[in-house]
Amino acid sequence: MKDRKELLAGAGTDTRLCHIGYDPSSYHGFVNPPVVHASTVLFPNVKTMETRGQKYTYGTRGTPTTDALCEAIDELEGSAGTILVPSGLAAITVPFLAFLSPGDHALIVDSVYSPCRHFCDTMLTRLGVEVEYYDPTVGAGIEALIKPNTRLVHTEAPASNTFEMQDIGAISAAAHRHGCVVTMDNTWATPLYFRPLDFGVDISMHAATKYPSGHSDILMGTVSANAKHWQRLQEANITLGICGTPDDSYQILRGLRTMNLRLEHHNRSALSVASWLEGHRDVARVLHPALPSFPGHEIWKRDFKGASGIFSFVLAVDEPTQFKPKARAFLDALRIFGLGYSWGGYESLAVMVNLDDRRICKAPTDGPVIRLQIGLENVEDIVADLEGGFAAAAAI
Ligand SMILES: *Cc1c(COP(=O)(O)O)cnc(C)c1O
């Protein structure tokens, strides 16, 4: 095991993705780990049972399948430990429940994934946690918002739907001066393009539903902690009785093997579509951190190794904000793009973005915001499909 770790430490990304969570000699030489369906695990005698003197004790506490995936994620994140949860949303709520108590104050980025806001404004507030939203561009200025009872600072970069960047290193340093836990939703970049723990983040969260799954057929979340916070995270997971299922864990591990290849394709295609959109007369703005025109691009360039396949653009149309007939016509005319939530699968998707819940970074006023996930289809076909959308919007 130690030899493997050393081998992987110096290897390239694709090599690492092929050999993390990989241990054929433990499974009679079969390349992949078995899918272990389990509740009960048997013990050879009472003493072993009383002392929990064997590696596996019960299905909720890990199996060879879930362990293989957690090891793989730890390798990618540089974390001390990883838990698996049933969705990306649970990858946010479980650590919040692990680290926050009544009377605590939590700072949440205003451009957060909106179901996270819903959790904060309902259940977390009901449990007596004081929630405050902050501007994603605050940087080291976060320090002025920290109160004696601030316990947790939650980040997400780039932002959901509008893609604002955050200076994660500066925020982490300021938060740590006051003893806060720093959490980050790193779903957009995956650990291949950004490693939160290297920038001072304590807890990195992912919707593995997105790129690790890659095929729009699995829901799963992963939460990875540094050494200081691992025990408390793991305890919360066991206390809440939350665990990853064997079949889904197997599929996510399988997805990781090709994730870099898929991401490179998403990255390249999305950038060429974004650049094309930037020159289109019916587009007011393109919200993509890898475009030099985008505010926050410098942070992206400094801290991130790549960009994934999801970004937004603002349609340059003068229409009432309520019904948005042109944006609707644009979306309804698309034939390659599906209209649907989530992203990270092989197929292109489009949605009209609703930013009504924002308090600080309000919705753009220059037109409706449309979010695109650029899939693995040929770019020429994707562009032709978008052309069809623009034509339909212009005809209204
Ligand atoms: C999709 C998403 C989630 C939630 O993932 P689910 O598995 O759909 O619950 C969390 N954070 C971000 C940034 C997401 O895009």
Image (cartoon, rainbow, N blue to C red):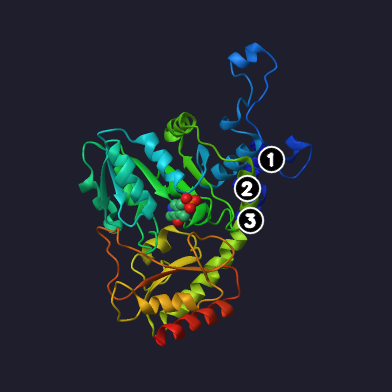
Residue farthest bottom in this picture: 395
Say which of 13 and 308 sits in front.
308
Say which of 186 and 344 sits in front.
344
The quadrant the N terminus occupies is top right
Check if mark 1's residue and mark 2's residue have beta carbons within 8 Å: no
**Classed neighbour count for the residue bearing mark 1: other residues with Cα under 10 Å, few (<14), some (14–19), many (≥20):** some
| Residue 51 against residue 290 in the figure, above or below | above
Q: Position of residue 320 (x, y in %)?
A: 28, 77
Residue type indicated by callout 2? Leu
Q: Residue at x 57, y 31 (%)?
A: 60
- Residue 61 is left or right of residue 170, and the answer is right
Q: Position of residue 294 (x, y in %)?
A: 36, 70
- CB at mark 3 closer than 8 A to ligand 1? no
Q: Quadrant of residue 200?
A: top left
Rounded to the nearest angstrom, the CA distance separating label 1 from label 3 is 24 Å
**Label for residue 14?**
3
Q: Position of residue 351 (x, y in %)?
A: 44, 67
Q: Nearer the observer, disc 1 or disc 3? A: 1
Say which of 217 and 154 sits in front.
217
Question: On the image, numbered disc 1 is attached to which residue?
Answer: 35
